[in-house]
Amino acid sequence: MPQDRIGKTRQAALRPLSTAPRGVLHRLPLGEFEHQRLAPPEDLADWIEHVWRVRWNLEGLAPQLQETLPHPNIHLVLEPGAAAVWGVHSRRWSRELAGRSQALGIKFRPGAFRPWLGGPVSALSDRSLPLQDLFGPEARGLNAALEIAGLSEAASPLLDFLRARLPEPDPQALLAGRIVDSVAADLSLHSAEALAARWNLSLRSLQRLFAEYVGVGPKWVIQRYRMHEAVARVQAGEEVSWAALAQDLGFFDQAHFSTAFRRLIGQAPSAYARRQG
């Protein structure tokens, strides 16, 4: 395991992420839509997963629905006239986009926002907190970053703002992040009990850690990453055997997988695949 980097001051240039974003359920059929992501500088890599910006232009068009399948992460989000910290959204996230606008944000590492919040991250689940309520009136000026053209340059004042307010290192925050990473990397983990055993924790200790630092339970995280994998395979254009996929992802059978997929995505797996095609 590499040495923890929290507290180090080495910085590196922001670079675009080469991997495709997971969780965007549909592409907008009309208009312009741009989604950019940058890896964080090295000195903030234990705190931040990436910086992102979405911009859209639907002028002259009807509003369009954008839906995503959220991850177990806290986001700092700037929009025209608004600045907030958003907790983990436990369900499918939907928003109607209209006109021309944008949002600029920071996606924090799982567990990493707890030291800033100063309380259980589960208190933010399915809700947001105005940035000024957390950081005071100095946060007002951050929205000026929306006027900066380049994403790396726009991100700089946000990153500097956070650097000036870095909390003390918290080993539990790092532990929570590593456990979530292990779930994302290993789809053979199908239960919270197995996850707890892998990390030599009791199930109750794991549940407390996630409530305090992640904002959702370990079972939720396991199920969410399984569904991200299912959506990614469909979007990749693979010929999907639903029964085999259900088995790969640890569902009891195809019927249980289909029920979970429909409940979260809003469509049966076959209907979603047809729409993507």
Image (tube, grey):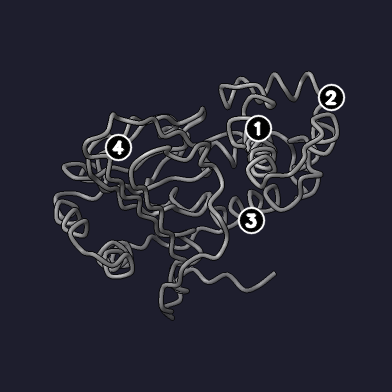
Could you say whether the residue bearing mark 3 is in a helix, strand or loop? Answer: helix
Mark sitting on residue 129: 4
Q: Is residue 102 above or below residue 70?
A: below
For the residues bearing labels 1 and 3, Cβ distance under 8 angstroms:
no
Q: Position of residue 116 (x, y in %)?
A: 37, 51
Spatial separation of the CA atoms under disc 1 and disc 4: 36 Å
First reached walking from the N terminus: tag 2 or tag 3: 3
Residue at screen point 34% across, 47% down: 32
Tell me if mark 2 has few (under 14), some (14-19) or many (20+) residues whose alpha carbon lies within 10 angstroms of its own: few
First reached walking from the N terminus: tag 1 or tag 2: 2
Location of residue 210 (image quadrant): top right
Q: What's the amino acid at mark 1?
A: Ala
What residue is pinned by disc 2?
Answer: 252
Query: Which of labels 1 and 3 is toward the front?
Result: 1
Could you say whether the residue bearing mark 4 is in a helix, strand or loop? Answer: strand
Residue at screen point 56% across, 22% down: 266
Tell me if mark 1 has few (under 14), some (14-19) or many (20+) residues whose alpha carbon lies within 10 angstroms of its own: some
What residue is pinned by disc 3?
Answer: 178
Query: Which of labels 1 and 2 is toward the front?
Result: 1
Spatial separation of the CA atoms under disc 2 and disc 3: 27 Å
On the rendered structure, is 87 left or right of 145?
A: right
What residue is pinned by disc 1?
Answer: 273
Q: Position of residue 114 (x, y in %)?
A: 44, 48
Q: Along the line of sight, which residue is nearer the eye, 169 or 43?
A: 43
Q: What's the amino acid at mark 3?
A: Arg
Q: What's the amino acid at mark 4?
A: Leu
Spatial separation of the CA atoms under disc 2 and disc 4: 38 Å
Residue at screen point 31% across, 52% down: 104
For the residues bearing labels 2 and 3, Cβ distance under 8 angstroms:
no
Tell me if mark 4 has few (under 14), some (14-19) or many (20+) residues whose alpha carbon lies within 10 angstroms of its own: some
First reached walking from the N terminus: tag 4 or tag 3: 4
